[in-house]
Image: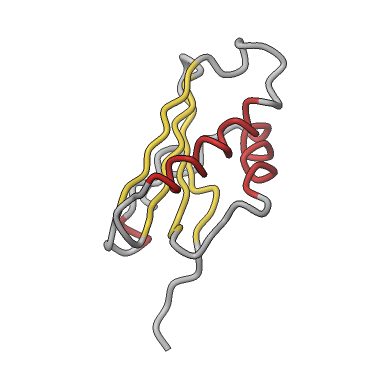
Amino acid sequence: MKSKNTLPDWLMLWLWRALLGEIYPNIRAIAASFSEDKELRVRFYLDRPPIEFDYESLADIVGLVLSNASSNEDIRSVKEECEYSTITQGELNALGGLVYARREYEI
Protein backbone atom coordinates (compact mmCIF):
# COMPACT_ATOMS: atom_id res chain seq x y z
CA MET A 1 0.00 0.00 0.00
CA LYS A 2 2.82 2.32 -0.91
CA SER A 3 0.89 4.64 -3.21
CA LYS A 4 -1.70 7.30 -2.56
CA ASN A 5 -5.20 6.67 -3.97
CA THR A 6 -5.33 8.17 -7.47
CA LEU A 7 -8.62 6.61 -8.58
CA PRO A 8 -11.39 9.00 -9.63
CA ASP A 9 -14.24 9.20 -7.13
CA TRP A 10 -16.79 7.97 -9.70
CA LEU A 11 -14.69 4.89 -10.38
CA MET A 12 -14.28 4.12 -6.68
CA LEU A 13 -18.08 4.21 -6.32
CA TRP A 14 -18.57 1.94 -9.33
CA LEU A 15 -16.03 -0.53 -7.95
CA TRP A 16 -17.49 -0.53 -4.44
CA ARG A 17 -20.98 -1.09 -5.83
CA ALA A 18 -19.73 -3.95 -8.03
CA LEU A 19 -18.07 -5.60 -5.01
CA LEU A 20 -21.28 -5.86 -2.99
CA GLY A 21 -21.83 -9.54 -2.34
CA GLU A 22 -18.76 -10.51 -4.41
CA ILE A 23 -16.08 -10.69 -1.71
CA TYR A 24 -15.12 -14.20 -0.60
CA PRO A 25 -12.63 -15.40 2.03
CA ASN A 26 -9.66 -16.02 -0.29
CA ILE A 27 -9.46 -12.38 -1.43
CA ARG A 28 -6.88 -10.53 0.66
CA ALA A 29 -7.11 -7.23 -1.19
CA ILE A 30 -8.30 -5.68 -4.42
CA ALA A 31 -6.25 -2.96 -6.08
CA ALA A 32 -7.16 -0.87 -9.09
CA SER A 33 -5.66 1.79 -11.30
CA PHE A 34 -6.98 4.05 -14.01
CA SER A 35 -4.58 5.55 -16.54
CA GLU A 36 -4.74 8.74 -18.59
CA ASP A 37 -5.46 6.46 -21.56
CA LYS A 38 -8.60 5.35 -19.69
CA GLU A 39 -7.30 1.84 -19.06
CA LEU A 40 -8.75 0.22 -15.96
CA ARG A 41 -6.62 -2.39 -14.18
CA VAL A 42 -8.15 -4.49 -11.40
CA ARG A 43 -6.03 -6.93 -9.42
CA PHE A 44 -7.15 -9.53 -6.89
CA TYR A 45 -4.57 -10.43 -4.24
CA LEU A 46 -5.34 -13.95 -3.04
CA ASP A 47 -4.16 -16.14 -0.16
CA ARG A 48 -3.73 -19.10 -2.53
CA PRO A 49 -2.82 -19.58 -6.20
CA PRO A 50 -5.60 -18.34 -8.52
CA ILE A 51 -8.13 -20.79 -9.90
CA GLU A 52 -10.70 -20.41 -12.68
CA PHE A 53 -13.34 -19.24 -10.16
CA ASP A 54 -11.18 -16.22 -9.27
CA TYR A 55 -10.89 -15.11 -12.89
CA GLU A 56 -14.64 -15.58 -13.40
CA SER A 57 -15.41 -13.58 -10.26
CA LEU A 58 -13.09 -10.79 -11.38
CA ALA A 59 -14.71 -10.76 -14.84
CA ASP A 60 -18.15 -10.46 -13.20
CA ILE A 61 -16.99 -7.48 -11.13
CA VAL A 62 -15.45 -5.77 -14.14
CA GLY A 63 -18.66 -6.39 -16.09
CA LEU A 64 -20.66 -4.67 -13.35
CA VAL A 65 -18.26 -1.73 -13.39
CA LEU A 66 -18.51 -1.43 -17.16
CA SER A 67 -22.31 -1.51 -17.00
CA ASN A 68 -22.10 1.95 -15.37
CA ALA A 69 -20.20 3.42 -18.29
CA SER A 70 -22.22 5.58 -20.66
CA SER A 71 -19.86 4.88 -23.56
CA ASN A 72 -16.48 3.41 -24.33
CA GLU A 73 -15.08 6.88 -23.64
CA ASP A 74 -15.40 6.31 -19.86
CA ILE A 75 -13.22 3.19 -19.86
CA ARG A 76 -11.45 2.20 -23.08
CA SER A 77 -9.72 -1.01 -21.99
CA VAL A 78 -9.46 -3.33 -18.99
CA LYS A 79 -6.75 -5.55 -17.54
CA GLU A 80 -7.85 -8.22 -15.06
CA GLU A 81 -5.21 -9.79 -12.82
CA CYS A 82 -5.27 -12.41 -10.08
CA GLU A 83 -2.15 -12.79 -7.96
CA TYR A 84 -1.21 -15.06 -5.09
CA SER A 85 0.72 -13.17 -2.43
CA THR A 86 1.92 -13.86 1.08
CA ILE A 87 3.59 -10.50 1.70
CA THR A 88 1.99 -8.15 4.20
CA GLN A 89 -0.76 -5.87 2.97
CA GLY A 90 1.49 -2.89 3.59
CA GLU A 91 3.92 -4.25 1.02
CA LEU A 92 1.33 -4.97 -1.70
CA ASN A 93 1.38 -2.81 -4.82
CA ALA A 94 -1.82 -0.83 -4.37
CA LEU A 95 -1.66 0.38 -8.00
CA GLY A 96 -3.86 3.52 -7.98
CA GLY A 97 -5.57 2.52 -4.73
CA LEU A 98 -6.98 -0.36 -2.75
CA VAL A 99 -10.73 -0.72 -3.11
CA TYR A 100 -10.89 -3.61 -0.64
CA ALA A 101 -8.57 -5.04 2.01
CA ARG A 102 -9.56 -7.74 4.46
CA ARG A 103 -8.58 -7.34 8.06
CA GLU A 104 -5.42 -9.32 8.72
CA TYR A 105 -3.91 -9.55 12.16
CA GLU A 106 -2.69 -12.06 14.69
CA ILE A 107 -4.32 -12.40 18.08
The x and y percentages for residue 30 are 47, 49
Q: How many marks?
A: 0
In which quarter of the view is residue 61 placed?
A: top right
Q: Residue at x 50, y 70 (%)?
A: 103
Q: Residue at x 37, y 38 (%)?
A: 81
The x and y percentages for residue 39 are 47, 21
- Farthest residue to the front: give it: 52
- Farthest residue to the bottom: give it: 107
Residue 94 placement, left or right of 48: right
> Relative to the observer, which residue lies in front, 78 or 6?
78
The x and y percentages for residue 1 are 39, 52
Q: Is 55 drawn above or below residue 27 in the view shown? A: above
Residue 100 placement, left or right of 68: left
In which quarter of the view is residue 43 placed?
A: top left
Quadrant, the C terminus = bottom left
Q: Residue at x 68, y 26 (%)?
A: 67
Q: What sort of colour scheme is used for the picture?
A: secondary structure
Q: Residue at x 42, y 47 (%)?
A: 44
The x and y percentages for residue 73 are 61, 10
Q: Is 104 drawn above or below residue 56 in the view shown? A: below
Residue 24 placement, left or right of 106: right
> Relative to the observer, which residue lies in front, 18 or 37?
18
Residue 77 placement, left or right of 72: left
